[in-house]
Amino acid sequence: MSHTHTPNDHAAHAAHAGGHDKKHPHTFGDAHHAIELLKFADGMVHAMMKNWPADKQCAIPFPHDQSLMWTLGHLATSADWFHWLMTGEPGVCPKDWEALFGMGSKPAHDPKMYPKFEDVMRAYQASITRMNEALAHLTDEQLHQPVMGESHGMAKTRLDAAHRTAWHIGWHTGQLSTTRRGLGLASAFAS
């Protein structure tokens, strides 16, 4: 059986190769652990997207729900910010996405308000890959250094920024779960 390797697989391999704790050779370092957390969180996003109808990507069944479109765009722009906290490198999402998906933005019902879903999905996936690749190249010592900019209390260290990314994805994945229910979709975890 063949396996298609994704960029996340390569990042995990790089972290595995160089991410061992030197004092405890049978354990993995912080980078590998953070990559595994992000891979798990990303897997939950993909589970929530299972059988989501294309015509419901901007649906908001209850007033406090978020749409799939907004959530993926928000996670992509947020990952840009968390990546900046870890590396100091600027984000890659288009600047006008901040108004659509950034902190304080509100989900819209109208798909015409947003970029194409495929572009938002591609940006979300790229943001996860970018985080994992950055983690794979940071040493445990670097990960325990302060973040590269103002985090507004979200993270003290670069490792905190990686962990908060996974937490943030989990938070919004839970919201997608209620949106799924409101749309009458089956459980994402049903066989």
Image (cartoon, rainbow, N blue to C red):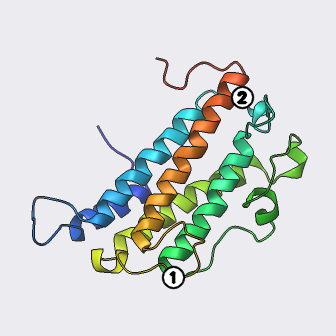
- Per the model, the C-alpha gap separating discs 2 and 1 is 40 Å
From this view, report whether residue 63 is shown above or below residue 89: above
Q: Nearer the viewer, residue 151 or 18?
A: 151
Looking at the image, is mark 2 or mark 1 earlier in the sequence? 2
**Residue at (46, 17) in percent of width and height:** 191
Residue closest to the eye, 46 or 108? 108
* Picture quarter with the N terminus: top left
Determine if residue 140 is in view: yes
* Residue identifier under label 2: 53
In the rendered image, residue 108, in percent from the top left (x then y), is placed at 85, 45
Q: What type is the residue that disc 1 sits on?
A: Met
Q: Which mark is residue 4?
A: none
Question: Is 34 left, or right, of 179 in this rendering?
Answer: left
- Which residue is situated farthest in the front direction here? 153
Q: Which residue is mark 1?
A: 148
- Residue 189 x/y as whole percent: 48, 24
Q: Amino acid at mark 2?
A: Pro
The quadrant in which residue 183 appears is: top right
Q: Position of residue 142 (x, y in %)?
A: 34, 80
